[in-house]
C-alpha cells in the first residue's frame, strides 16, 4: 500500500515558464499591465488567466504548438520515476488549466500522474478555464482550492511532500511534511512562518530526499 506521495505545482515548478507569459509575449502585450494589476491584488487569479488565455486568437492546432513550446524542468521525468520506484505517488495540483497540463505530460511521455487543476477547453480561438462552483475543490479566486485538495490527500497518505513556486502554493505548503520552495515562494513562506527547503529544480529536491532516506541514494 502506498503511504506517501510527492505533490507538485505545475506552472513555474514543473514547467520552467508559465503558459500565460508565452501567450502575453506572442499575442497579448496588453497582458503585462494586467499582470501587474493581478499581482497588486486588483484581479482574481482565475479572471486574469481567462482574459489572457482567451486573447490568443488562434486555431487549436496553433495553441497546441504553443503549449509544446513550454519548457519543462529536464529533471522532472526521472524524478517522477524515482518517486514511483521508491513506492510513492506523484500528484499535480495546479491553479492553471488541465488542458495544457495533460497535453504537456503526453508530449513528455509522463504517465499515470493524477492532475487536480481547472478544467478548460479551446473555443473561439482561445483557451477558456471553466471551474465548477459546485465542485468540492472550487475556489472563487483560484478556481481550484489547492489546500482543500491537499487536505483530502492527507487523509489518504501518511506523508506528503510538496513543491511550488508562488503565492497559491503557500496554502497547501502548510500541510506538507517537507515543502520545497522555488522562485517567489520562499519570502511568502517566511512571512507565514512555514518551514521549507529552498531549491531551484527537481534535481535538488531529489538530492534532499536521498539525504532523508526517502529516495534510493544510488
Image: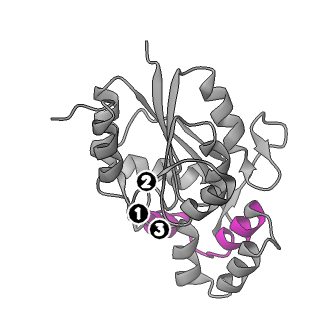
The residue at 35%/58% (across/down) is 73
Rounded to the nearest whole Å, what is the CA distance between mark 1 and mark 2?
A: 7 Å
- Indicate the secondary structure of the residue bearing disc 3: loop
Rounded to the nearest whole Å, what is the CA distance between mark 3 and mark 2?
A: 13 Å
Question: Could you say which is closer to the camera, residue 72 or residue 111?
Answer: 72
The residue to which callout 2 is attached is: 104
Rounded to the nearest whole Å, what is the CA distance between mark 1 and mark 3?
A: 12 Å
The residue to which callout 3 is attached is: 17
Query: Residue 169: where, in percent of width, then height?
Result: 61, 52
Res. 81 in view: no
Q: Quadrant of the N terminus?
A: top left
Residue 182 lies in the magenta-colored region: no
The residue at 56%/37% (across/down) is 176
Callout 3: few (<14), some (14-19), or many (20+) C-alpha neighbours within 10 Å? some
The residue to which callout 1 is attached is: 68
Answer above or below: position of 169 versus 113: below
Query: Residue 50: where, in percent of width, then height?
Result: 72, 65
Q: Is most of the magenta stretch helix, strand or loop?
A: helix
Amino acid at each position: 500500500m502506498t503511504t506517501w506521495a510527492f505533490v507538485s505545482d505545475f506552472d513555474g515548478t514543473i514547467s520552467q515558464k508559465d503558459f500565460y507569459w508565452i501567450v502575453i509575449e506572442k499575442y497579448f502585450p496588453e497582458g503585462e499591465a494586467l499582470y501587474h494589476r493581478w499581482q497588486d491584488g486588483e484581479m482574481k487569479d482565475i479572471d486574469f488567466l481567462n482574459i489572457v488565455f482567451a486573447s490568443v486568437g488562434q486555431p487549436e492546432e496553433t495553441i497546441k504548438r504553443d503549449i509544446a513550446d513550454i519548457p519543462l524542468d529536464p529533471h522532472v521525468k526521472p524524478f517522477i520515476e524515482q518517486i514511483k520506484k521508491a513506492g510513492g505517488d506523484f500528484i499535480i495540483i495546479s491553479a492553471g488549466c488541465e488542458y495544457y497540463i495533460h497535453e504537456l505530460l503526453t508530449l513528455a511521455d509522463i504517465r499515470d500522474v493524477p492532475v487536480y487543476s481547472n478544467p478548460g477547453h479551446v473555443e473561439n480561438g482561445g483557451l477558456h478555464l471553466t471551474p465548477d462552483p459546485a465542485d468540492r475543490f472550487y475556489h472563487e479566486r483560484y478556481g481550484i482550492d489547492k489546500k482543500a485538495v491537499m487536505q483530502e490527500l492527507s487523509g489518504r497518505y501518511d506523508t506528503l511532500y510538496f513543491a511550488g513556486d508562488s503565492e497559491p502554493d503557500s496554502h497547501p505548503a502548510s500541510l506538507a511534511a517537507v515543502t520545497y520552495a522555488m522562485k517567489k515562494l520562499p519570502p511568502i513562506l517566511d512571512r507565514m512562518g512555514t518551514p521549507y527547503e529552498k531549491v531551484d529544480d527537481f534535481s535538488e529536491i531529489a538530492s534532499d530526499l536521498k539525504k532523508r532516506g526517502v529516495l534510493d541514494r544510488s
